[in-house]
Amino acid sequence: MYRERQCVMIILALTFLVSATVHAKGIGTTYDMSRFLSEPHPFATGINVRGQGLSSTRAAPALRSPLSAQAPTPRNQSTSRASVEPTAKSSRRTEPSGFGGGWLSEVRVGVLKHAVSLIGNTTKETGIDGNLEVLFEAPSFLGLLWSPRPTIGLTANSSATNTDIAYGGLTWEWAPWSNLILDFSLGMAVHNGELKFDPSVAFPANAGRHREFGCRWLFRESFEAGWLFAKRHAATIMWSHYSHGGLCDDKNEGLDNIGVRYGYRF
């Protein structure tokens, strides 16, 4: 018991001496609070860099919860398929302007040489024809036929006694390269010319001057080639042929016209 008391007294004496020494060193000295204030908070997220007036901190990486990770959004099958599949290339090289109301495609006007024949009589019916043609947008049901454009037109001769023709049909167009366009048209036509001269008349007024078509209704075919410029304008050369193909009468002189045309696309 006596030894325990001695140990306690020794420990208390050492404690007193240490505290007195520390107190003696602190006498006349002011405690620097700036060091305390400059120390980072123990729960701060940055790392303090000492030795400078300002402290620069580097943000600690944010923890990402496994629950916050979202699964990748499934791709829309229809959208991805539409973006991958190439769109069908149309032979038409301009977008509709809206002036045609969605149904009018193109208007063409031209000047044609009337009754140009490589084979047969070229002296019957001469002169110049004026031509007007209207092409409409291809309806969806004509997609099975490669989407031809419905076409109507009128050809009027400069002479009042020569043949005038009104026609209608379908027009196919191809654009093989650049702005080159190729057209083929097939349809029917009606005319106001002569069908067949009456042999009983000794001197028919129009004998030898007008063609004998044999039928009032004729087949019409045309080929056209040209150049598309300024997006909506076209300059072309056209050849057209009219005849009944031997379906209604032995008279079938037919008619061929050739000329130039200008087209505007809506």
Image (cartoon, rainbow, N blue to C red):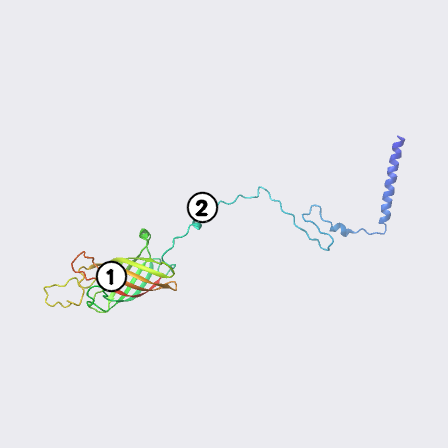
What residue is disc 1 on? 241
Q: How many labels does the image show?
A: 2
When the figure is inspected, residue 196 is found, relative to residue 62, above or below; the finding is below
Which residue reaches farthest front?
119
When the figure is inspected, residue 44 is found, relative to residue 181, above or below; the finding is above
Q: Dot 2 surroundings within 10 Å: few (below 14), some, or many (20 or more)?
A: few
Residue 190: x and y in percent read 22, 60
In the image, is 96 to the left or to the right of 256?
right
What residue is disc 2 on? 77
* Residue nearest the observer in this picture, 23 or 263: 263
Say whether disc 2 or disc 1 marks the residue closer to the N-terminus: 2
- The amino acid type, in three-letter code, at marker 1 is His
When the figure is inspected, residue 228 is found, relative to residue 67, above or below; the finding is below
In the image, is 31 to the left or to the right of 89?
right
- The amino acid type, in three-letter code, at marker 2 is Gln
Q: Which of marks 2 and 1 is in front?
A: 1
Element at label 1? strand
Q: What label sits on residue 263 in the rendered view?
A: none
The residues tagged by marks 2 and 1 sit, at their Cα atoms, a distance apart of 52 Å
Residue 231: x and y in percent read 39, 62
Q: Dot 1 surroundings within 10 Å: few (below 14), some, or many (20 or more)?
A: some
Q: Quadrant of the N terminus?
A: top right
Q: Looking at the image, which residue is at 87% across and 40% down?
A: 14
